[in-house]
Image: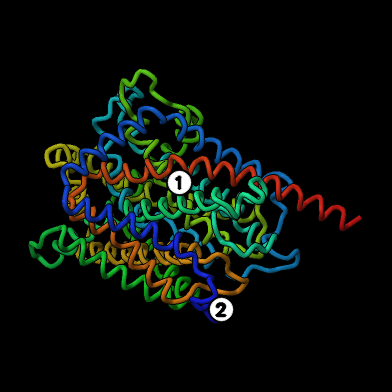
Amino acid sequence: MKNNLQIKNGSVDWMITFLPFGVIVALCVLFFLKPEQSNDILGQIRFFFGDTFGTYYLIIGLGFFLISLFIALSKYGNIVLGGREEKPKFSFFSWGAMMFTCGLAADILFYSFAEWVMYADSPHIAELGNFQEWAGVFPIYHWSFIPWSFYLVLAVSFGFMLHVRKRERQKFSEACRPILGKYTDGIWGRVIDLLAVFALLAGTATTFSVATPLMASIINELLGIDISRSLCTIIILLLTCMCYTYALLHGFKGISILAKVCIYMFFGLLLYVLLFSGHTGYIIDTGVESLGRVVQNFIEMSTYTDPLRTTNFPQDWTIYYWAYWMVWCVAAPFFIGSISRGRTIRQTIFGGYFFGVGSTIISFVVLGNYSMGLQMTGMADFIALYQQTGDLYGLIISIIDTIPCVPFVLVLVVLTMITFYATSFDSIALTASCYSYRKLNKGKSPHKLIQLLWCVLLILLPIALVFADSSMSNLQTVSIVAAFPLGIVMVLIIVSFLKDAGRHLEEEKNRNL
């Protein structure tokens, strides 16, 4: 990597850098001073968006999955992200490891243990039939093909923009240039970039705030101490911030090494549970059956809107998950597009599904079906425990306590989550830093101080949300709101890509005549 760009000559876009910073600081102050009122307002906003615009999120979700298959299987799939003879910079394994860990890998591990429990009292599951048959279906559905399609479609769009068209502005607005034209450099481009940065901050806030309390609970369990979960969570957030800041400042090499460590620990955990839990047969059988039901009912599940609001299932679950992944599309796809140089669009999309969806499904199948097996065989009653306490973090600890060699598993889980978070936020901070520049020349990276600024900024809102003791539902609201305008921009990026890629293929055809 070449020398960092210096902060001079007007290269830094201070409005994009400090306006979101100011808004986030204001929100932090509000959450600190008015925690109860803030939570009430967030709850009302979530209901409004989920109830009024729910179908909007569902249409975007199914549309992105279908367009990903079209792009991969069509003439666009042959386009190399770079020169025609260019070879990939990273090995297949390193590339896949960074791709999986740059997104929501920590949350995938978190929800894998017990998401099925949260469906236990859902009227929709009861409508569908047997709990055994359906409880393991929705975790796979909510975390696999549609969510990863958001990443992959935008990743190839950004990769095409960066490596084929050689554009120097690594921003959402630049990806819309084939449609917006000269307006990209005006107010509309600025609005798009500000929306992207706000969405980025919302996504990171949700992620950090939702899952880090589990690590706090694990540390309390390991050390046998009783420290406030909020205080312990904040300490973990600060330590994680230090970890990803250190790795980021060492560039792609540091990120690649950290990603490999993540993957080894992650699959080591899954293999240990699969082989030594005593429920190998049940895990595999239920996993295969659940995956089959996802495939059989995919379109129906993707278009279920519950018009009469008899269960509110899509409003409470599916819509939130699509919004959650959409706000992460500001950072993860740029990172995936950057590391996919030298690969074809088809390889990028199908490779992403292989690593991303494959790893996700394995996680939910192994960890989720292990705990569900204990429930269905009467060896534990996790559903009753969760209904009594409402404490998801305590529930997951109870599940881990049933796995052989508990201390070893607890240490492995917390280390894996920390490295997952560190790797994810490496990619986020790097992408956010690029937004601070009006343009970045090929081979250049943002100044270290700009990267450091974003490392600090990304941690502020999560800490404020922890202090405010926001419920998980209210944390999710942040993502749902931010994703609404971003969905329009994402559609605009797809249209722009198809137009520009079509023009590129025509140019190649004419060149070969």
Label of residue 326 in the image: 1
Give, as a three-letter code, the residue at label 1. Met
In the rendered image, which quarter contains the C terminus? Answer: bottom right
In the rendered image, which quarter contains the N terminus? Answer: bottom right
The image shows residue 437, relative to residue 332, as above or below, that is: below
Place of residue 121 in the rendered image (x, y in percent of width and height, measured from the top left): 23, 30
Taking the spot 39% from the left edge, 20% from the top edge, the residue there is 307
The reply to whether residue 97 is visible in this rendering is: no
Give the camera-side residue of 203 and 181: 181
- At mark 2, the secondary structure is loop
Place of residue 374 in the rendered image (x, y in percent of width and height, measured from the top left): 23, 43
Give the camera-side residue of 489 and 387: 489
The reply to whether residue 365 is visible in this rendering is: yes
Label of residue 89 in the image: none
Label of residue 1 in the image: 2
Q: Judge left or right: residue 359 versus residue 64.
A: left
Q: Which of marks 2 and 1 is nearer the N terminus?
A: 2
Task: Give the total number of marks visible in the rendering.
Answer: 2
Q: Residues within 10 Å of mark 1 (few under 14, many from 20)?
A: many
Give, as a three-letter code, the residue at label 2. Met
- At mark 1, the secondary structure is helix
Taking the spot 26% from the left edge, 70% from the top edge, the residue there is 239
Q: Quadrant of residue 200?
A: bottom left
Q: Judge left or right: residue 439 versus residue 307.
A: right
Q: Residue furthest top?
A: 308
Q: In which quarter of the image is residue 301?
A: top left
